Image (cartoon, rainbow, N blue to C red):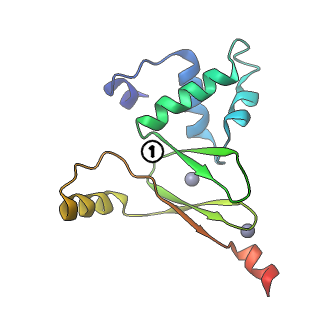
Amino acid sequence: MSHLKEKGIRITETRKAVVSYIIDSDDHPSAEMIYKDLLPNYPNMSLATVYNNLKVLLEEGFVTELKRANDNTTYYDFMGHEHLNVICERCGKITDFMDVEIPSLKREAHEQTGYRITKELLTIYGICPECQALES
Ligand SMILES: [Zn+2]
Ligand SMILES: [Zn+2]
C-alpha cells in the first residue's frame, strides 16, 4: 500500500479493498468478480466504484488488463511481482509465467530507443497443453 502513497494516490477504504483483493487473488478476476466478492463487506460500494479504482490502478501500472479470445470481459492482474501472463486462445485460461526479466527488458528498451520507460503491457498468447492434447 505504501507505493500507492508515494505516487500520491488517495487511498480510500474501497481502493484499499480492491488493491488487497487483486494482490491476494491467485486468479485473474474481472471487475464483476471483485465487486461480488467485496459487496458483503462493502455494501455501499457500486460496480462503478470498482471500475473507477481499477482505472486509477491501471494508469499507475499497478494492475494490468487481460483479454481472452472470444470473451469481451476484461480481467485484471496485480503486477507487483514481475511476471507475464500467457493466455490460451482456445479455452481462455490465464497462466502466470514467472521469472521474466522485465526490468532488463525495460532497460534494453530505454537503451535502444532513448525513451524513459513508464510501463509495459505485455501478454503472451498461445494454445495451452490441455487444448494441445485435444488437437492430436
Ligand atoms: Zn486451453
Ligand atoms: Zn498473472
Residue 59 in the image: state x and y as whole percent. 43, 35
Q: Is residue 27 above or below residue 68?
A: above
Task: Point out residue 21 in the picture as x, y percentages from the top left corner.
Answer: 61, 33
Q: Residues within 10 Å of mark 1 (few under 14, many from 20)?
A: few
Q: Secondary structure at mark 1?
A: loop
The one nearer the camera, 54 or 82, is 54
Location of residue 96 by image quarter: bottom right
Residue 101 lies left or right of residue 41; in this view the side is: left
Name the amino acid, label 1. Answer: Gly
Quarter residue 103 falls in: bottom left
Residue extending furthest top? Answer: 44
Tell whether 89 sits left or right of 4.
right
Q: Considering the image in quadrants, where does the C terminus appear?
A: bottom right
- Residue at the spot 79% in from the left edge and 83% down from the top edge: 135
Q: Quadrant of ligand 1?
A: bottom right
Of the pair 51 and 26, the residue shown nearer to us: 51
Q: How many marks?
A: 1
- Of all residues, the one furthest to the bottom in this rendering is 136
Task: For the N terminus, give its image quadrant.
Answer: top left
At x 37%, y 31%, the residue is 3
> What residue sits 36% from the left and 23% below the top?
5
Q: Residue at x 38, y 27 (%)?
A: 2
x%, y% of residue 91?
Answer: 76, 64
Q: Which residue is mark 1?
A: 80
Residue 5 vs 83, above or below: the answer is above
Left or right placement of residue 124 versus residue 28 in this view: left
